[in-house]
Image (spheres, rainbow, N blue to C red):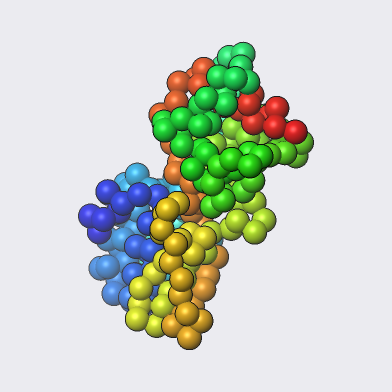
Amino acid sequence: MASFKTCPHTDADRLLEAFAQSSDDKVGETLVATLKASPVRSSLRPEFIKPRLAKYSPKVQKEAEALYALLNADAAKQKARVDELLADFKDGDVRRGQAVFNSTKAACSACHAIGYLGGTLGPDLTHVGKIRTERDLLEAIVFPSASFVRSYEPLQVTTKKGKVYNGLLATSATEEVRIARQDIDEVQPGKVSIMPAGLDQQLTRQELADLVTFLKGCK
C-alpha cells in the first residue's frame, strides 16, 4: 500500500489492477483508506475504481462511497483551480511561450510536435489554437487526465505473464515497447494521461500564461 504514497500518477492504475482479483475485506478496507490519503487520488475517477472493488463485500463497497465523494470533490476543485488561474491570468507573450514550450522545464516539445519539430508521443499541436479555447488549453496543461484527444487515449495492456503496461504502448517518451498479440491477455482503456500533471506547480503564472498564449496562436 505504501506504493500509492510515492508512485507517479501514471502508475496509479497499474497498482490498482494488482488488487482487482482480491476479495479479502481487510485488503479492500486498507486500499480504500490508502486511496483517500494518496497524492495520486486526484488522477483517479470513481468509474475506474469501482470495477477494482467489485469482488469485495458490501461493507467495503459502502466505505468506498466516501472515497467516491472525495474524488467527485477533487473534480470540482480542479474546475475551481482552472477558474482561479484564468481569473489571475497575466498577459501572455508568444515568443516567451515558445521558449517555455521548448524548455527542459516544461518539456512539451519532447512529446508534442509543432510544424516539423517536436516529439510524436502526444498529439500534434501545429493547429491546436484553431480547435481549443484558452480554457481548454489551460485545463489540458494543468489536468491532463481530465480529457483525452481521440487516438491518444491511454491504454492498459496486461500480458499473459501478468506484466502491466500503461500509456500509448510505451513506458516513456524515449522507450518503445512492442508486445506480440499472442502475449496479450487483456487491453483496457487507461484513465491516467501519460502527460505528467502539476505543471502549474512547476511553471510560474507568467510562464503558464505565455505557454497558453503561444499555443492559442498555433493556427
Question: Is residue 137 positioned above or below 28 on the image?
Answer: above
x, y percent for residue 42: 44, 45
How many numbered discs, if any?
0
Q: Quadrant of the C terminus?
A: top right
Across and down, in percent, residue 2 comes to 23, 55
User: Which image quadrant for residue 82?
Assistant: top right
Q: Position of residue 178 (x, y in %)?
A: 46, 71
Which residue lies at the image location 52% right of the left edge and 39% below the top edge?
A: 109
Q: Residue at x 53, y 70 (%)?
A: 188
**Residue found at x 26% / y 56%:** 3
On screen, residue 34 versus residue 126, left or right, reads: left
- Looking at the image, residue 158 lies above or below residue 45: below
Residue ID at (62%, 13%)? 91
Q: Is residue 115 visible?
A: yes
Residue 52 left/right relative to 24? right
State the residue lying farthest toward the left.
2
Asked if residue 76 can be seen in this view, the reply is: no
- Which quadrant of the rendered structure holds the N terminus? bottom left
- Pinpoint residue 191: horizontal percent, then vertical percent: 51, 57
